[in-house]
Amino acid sequence: MIKREIEINGKTLRISTGQVAKQAAGSVLVSYGETTIIAAVNAAKEMREDIDFFPLQVEYRERHYAGGKIPGGFFKREARPAEREILTCRLTDRPIRPLFPKSFKYETQGIITVLSTDGENPADVLAGVGASAALMISNIPWNGPIATVRVARVDDNFIVNPTKEEMEDSSLELVVSGNSETIVMVEGEADVIPENVFVDALKFAHEDIKKIIAMQEEIVAEVKPEKREIPEEESNKDLAVAVEKSLGAEVERIIQIGDKQERETATKELHDNTAAAMAEEFPESEKEVKGLVNDKFKAAFRERVLETGVRSDGRGTTDIRDITIEPAFLPRTHGSVLFTRGETQALVVTTLGSKRDEQIIDSMDEDYKKNYYLHYNFPPYCVGEVGRVGFTSRREVGHGNLAERSLKPVLPDYEEFPYTVRVVSEIMESNGSSSMASVCGGSLALMDAGCPLKEHVAGIAMGLILDGKRHAVLSDILGAEDHLGDMDFKVAGTKDGISAIQLDLKIEGISFELLEEALEQARLGRLHILEKMNEALSKPGEISDYAPKIITLSINPEKIGGLIGPGGKIIKKIIADTECDVNVDDDGTVTIAGVDKVRLEEAAEIVKAVTLEPEVGMEFDGIVTRMMTFGAFVEIVPGKEGLVHISEMDWKRTERVEDVCKTGDAMRVKLIKVDDQGRLDLSRKALLDKPEGYVEPPPRSRDRNRGGRGGGSRFGGGGGRRDGGRGRSDGGHRDRPVRKKRF
């Protein structure tokens, strides 16, 4: 076994190989604190000849046993990957993919499994380190290594690989991957901070990245892996000359077509015509012809931008596409907007819900709830294609998460706006930057729903073309500019700073100077978009009549059991009678949600009554629940009853209780005594006019041991679920430290 270790933020990072998974092409154990993962990689023995892309598959899986837990659900087995696992797959895939040789078309798979978690040190950043180390010691050709770390900022000080506790006080969270020279991938969020702070954070992260890379290189030097030969791409020079001659000036003409569909149609026709023209002289060369045509398109596109500064749609490098905004686009939704930027269009809808609509997260190291989430849908029709419709793709999960994190810093605290908030972005058409359109549309849809955002958030995608000493940074990139360029750099934020960021490169890295240039250009573009958004909708609208209304009450925590009742009887009855949702937290916060304002207030009054501290002298409109020879029990509020003794029925002597009332009758009573066992003595006659000349009759005996007067039962007792069987409401609020839930 070969092992190396270094210290990062006061804890030991270990990488070892040669102990487990020895039949894999490369495998390592990576541990940090008591969190441990295994990363194993393999590549197929036969090359795929039928594809023009690199077939890489990265899988990250968390095991509940790692945290000493058993999965929930019927089967008690980990099912399909959760959202956090998918996001970690993406975090691992994105920095390693560009570093494979272009000609290497062997199916390659990396599997990372979390074996142990200490609940404090997240495993996601270890996945990137493990994948890199496993590839480096394998026989798979790969231009690494890279390393991945997380950066936090607490009290203006940066921390690498913070614990969850440290993240609770952090104003920034960045996951950063890099090589020994620069940064290759970034993803993160912040409480709206300036661009220069982000750059400083990246530079800080890079120092520890270099240390982890050096550790990997020591392991490689000891393992001495023998790498596979990189396949040479065969080229037919005669075919290349013939294709070049056949194309003529068509490529230059097509790359200047602004309309996406028209440009794609012309491109396909050119592919088909060129392949047909080559068929006789160069049979069975269709695939190679396509590659040569694509290479010509890429070269021409990049040269045009670098030489003239003019893009395919006629814009300059800093220009933003035309923007149109239509708030309140849908009639019955709580909030909606149709946001269009060029040929990218997002229909974004906000729905407001109650506490029962919180999302429950079951993970290996903690269970929690979210009361804000954003979902992103990318149907095939948005790009004019036919495709599979079914489960959510990794792309949809990733783009949705980025948009969700972008908007989170401007949401109001839960106490100010006690709603569960769901935002859904339906991409209607796409020609680049649909995730950032979702950010803009999401901010507008939230305001349209009446959510009091602190301010608008806008998002913009930046591109890069780098050719030796020449470069061009592109604002608000098209799909083709993403595909043919070297960078996809998404930046979201307010007028004051950045709230979320995502950087992906198709090259081995870029300088910090270029990053700073791109961030400044993104800031100017963001300000332009924010101006358009504020012109369309500058302040929150009224909450929709179709949205639930919410009342929040605070009760004595000792009264929670009485509100719930035995087996949830009381709270269930309130819900059934008022058609409102009622939930109670352990701290005594009661949340009542309903569409009908009258029923909502009714439910609130019942909750107040049920949790009332009874005081002598209070009057109640009660219901007779039980008849006894000595008196009648009256329910003054749900779950609470007291005794109206026969002597307290009327001023005149009452021979039988049935002469005054029967079960189910309404009776107004006054509380005249609370005994030392908490039992309530009520009086009907105290609220009646005393007859003139009334003479007090001799007192009757009052048997305190007569059936049914147990104080506990009259107060509803304790036990039962606090939400009427709907699940307890605890945690997941927007005002709580969000980083705690991201790991």
Image (cartoon, rainbow, N blue to C red):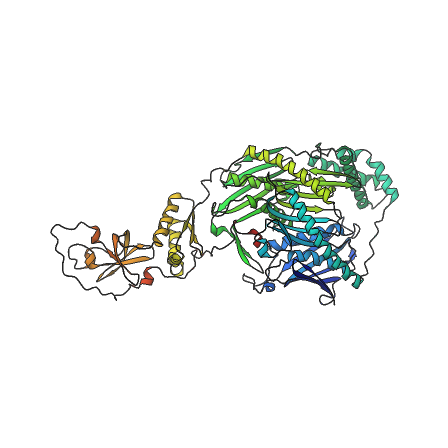
Whether residue 427 is visible here, answered yes or no, is no
Front in this rendered view, residue 177 or 628: 177
Residue 61 lies, in percent from the top left, at 64, 59
In this rendering, the count of numbered labels is 0
> Left of 582 or right of it: where is 511?
right
- The quadrant in which the C terminus is found is bottom right
Q: Which residue is most to the right?
A: 238
> Left of 469 or right of it: where is 113?
left
Front in this rendered view, residue 446 or 375: 446
Residue 649 lies, in percent from the top left, at 20, 56
Question: What residue do we see at 47% from left, 49% from top?
Answer: 354
Residue 414 lies, in percent from the top left, at 49, 48
Q: Quadrant of residue 524?
A: top right
Residue 239 lies, in percent from the top left, at 86, 42
Whether residue 373 is visible here, answered yes or no, is yes
Q: Quadrant of residue 11?
A: bottom right
- The quadrant in which the N terminus is found is bottom right
> Left of 361 or right of it: where is 713?
left
Q: Which residue is most to the left?
A: 693
Question: What residue do we see at 74% from left, 41% from top?
Answer: 484
